[in-house]
Image: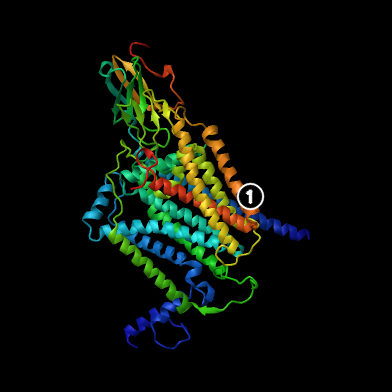
Amino acid sequence: MSTLQRVWASIRGSGPVTNSSSNDPRKYLRNFLLHFRPAEVPERSIGFALTAYLGVASTVLLVMLILSGLMLKFVYEPSATHAYASIVYIGSEVPFGQLLRNLHRWSGYALLVTAFLHLLRVFYTGAFHGPRQFNWIIGLALMALVLLSNFTGYLLPWDQISYWAVTISTSLLDYVPGIGTPLKELILGGPEPGPATLLNFYALHTAILPLSLVFLVLFHFWRIRMAHGIVVRRAPDERLTSPLPMVRTVPHLVTREAAAALLVVAAMLALSMTLDAPLAEQANPGMSPNPTKAPWFFMGIQEILMHLHPLFAALVIPACLLAFLLCLPYLRHDAPATGVWFGSKRGRRTVLAAAIAGCLLTAGGVLLSEAVLSADTASPPTVLRNGLIPFLAIVAVVAGFYAMIKKALDASKSEAVQALFTFLTSAFLTLTLIGTWFRGAGMQLVWPG
Amino acid sequence: MAMQEKKTSRRTFLNALWVGVGALSLAEIGFLISRFLKPREQRFAENTADAVIAAGSVDAFDPGSVTAFVRGKFYLARLDNGGFLALSRTCTHLGCTVPWVDDEKRFVCPCHASAFSINGEVLAPPAPRALDLFDIRIENGQVLVDTGKRTKRVGFEAAQAVYPGRA
């Protein structure tokens, strides 16, 4: 054996890599893949109709974000005096710089969308029951990390949009009693956003958050293996323990995943070539632009803030929603995981009704509150009049809706909880849309355009 | 039976010891991190020697006028009755910078449309409190504003205004 051959043999390793004796180089890839994928997966788990490959898309976006972010680190300067100039430099002087920045920005937003849709998929196919309860919690933690990554990254260009978005988002913490203001000053490194804030956010965005994300994603994957794969469709009369028809992971699952991954990469590249990431003038602490908006993914909260006392908008309502999400898998459901979207035909109907009701009631509530507010502009808002009373009214509407779904539509508990989740999600999305597109100068309601 | 209990208790004790030592070392690391991050506060803090700003002569400000001071991040408002107020330019709602709209004689926040009167009181929600105040001294006809001393308040009271010629 020549030296070269011996070196190659040492790289390839010994031992039985596969049972095929061919010298096909793909067997090394297969061998590698099978270290963390099962050899066989249920045939029903690999179709587009069950998962829409949203987990795959999210993973691919995370990888793209890490790679493009690593490239941007070579040009970006995290100091208040140089950050903006370095972003302009990336866009105007660095070959492919603008493309890379676009790719990073749009992939970050896309990850928020795919991760959220993945959460909806998991919820509506009942994949948070049984052995997957804790993986739902890990998923929520991942969602929080994705939100924080987007938020910290939002500040880095240090332009008027990012500076003021971070100012108003972090000022929300002032309304959390006790720990709010110290927490805000810890995050900002001072009483208001400044050079320390930029350095804090840079360290979080480029090291702590991505490391945590990668670690938790691997944990998330491992728990899928522990649960013997993802949830799959079962016929109503089929026993949950009966064996499923299986296919080999390579090539049946892996090729589908690769196709989905390539589509995601192609879509993000196409988007980045056509649409530039936003950049306003350099941050100016002396002048707030009109209107000043939070990042779009926090616009739902900012819209609530337009109507309710900040204590409720910033603390009570988000805490209630988070508690609901955390408790979801541990409620006593009366239907097991079926892997069928919306559980049943009636489930589908109640979800549709809940989505429409959530959207219309929210839009109506916004208009009503707007009319009341413009009639009464004399006195500053109080916790009772602008907080507790409207909050209890909202709780009454939501509880009434839950009771109606259960009684009038004769829904099971699982279906009613599903409808409640849909109602709240629809309401939050409506608020986000209103805040993002229907608020103009002075945060007045306007038609978009 | 007795021996077993004794064995378990020794093991329990040692395990508890390990947990305790682990917690202690975590606390040490936490202390180390907090000490490590401490000097940054001074490095990024604004120089407090500049906190007192000489705004100018009393006569330079007409009654009913508002003057912006970019360096101190405040407005010097002179009320119609001649009193002075140094108002923080930061909206009490979510921290936006509020500009003075001279035509309407009010501060209007561009972020959520809160409005404040010349003495800082809330004219339109969602702002929950009047604009913060900074301390004012008048010495030898000069208005001095101490931006290091910020007072939070709910509304305006006559005693908050500082008048020239009174102690």
- Which residue is located at x 34 percent, y 56 percent? A105
Place of residue A249 in the rendered image (x, y in percent of width and height, measured from the top left): 49, 77
Classify the position of the N terminus of chain A by image quarter.
bottom left
Q: In the picture provided, is B32 more to the left or to the right than A66? A: right
Residue A162 percent across, percent down from the top left = 34, 46
- Residue type, mark 1 in image: Ala
- Classify residue A189 by image quadrant: top left
Q: Tell me: B106 left or right of A21.
A: left
x, y percent for residue A75 = 27, 55
Camera-nearest residue between A264 and B49: A264
The residue most toward the left is: A93
Query: Is residue B39 among what the camera can see?
Result: no
Classed neighbour count for the residue bearing mark 1: other residues with Cα under 10 Å, few (<14), some (14–19), many (≥20): some
User: In this orientation, which residue lies closer to the viewer: A220 or A302?
Assistant: A302
Disc tally is 1
Q: Residue at x 32, y 87 (%)?
A: A2
Q: Residue at x 39, y 62 (%)?
A: A61
Q: Which residue is mark 1?
A: A403
Chain letter for mark 1 = A
* Drawn side of residue A98 relative to residue A318, left or right: left
Can you name the residue that lies furthest to the front here? Answer: A408
- Residue B74 visible in the snapshot: yes
Q: Is residue B120 above or below residue A40?
A: above
Q: Is residue A294 above or below residue B9?
A: above
Q: Is residue A402 above or below residue B75?
A: below
Measured as percent of width and height from the top left, residue A54 is found at 46, 64
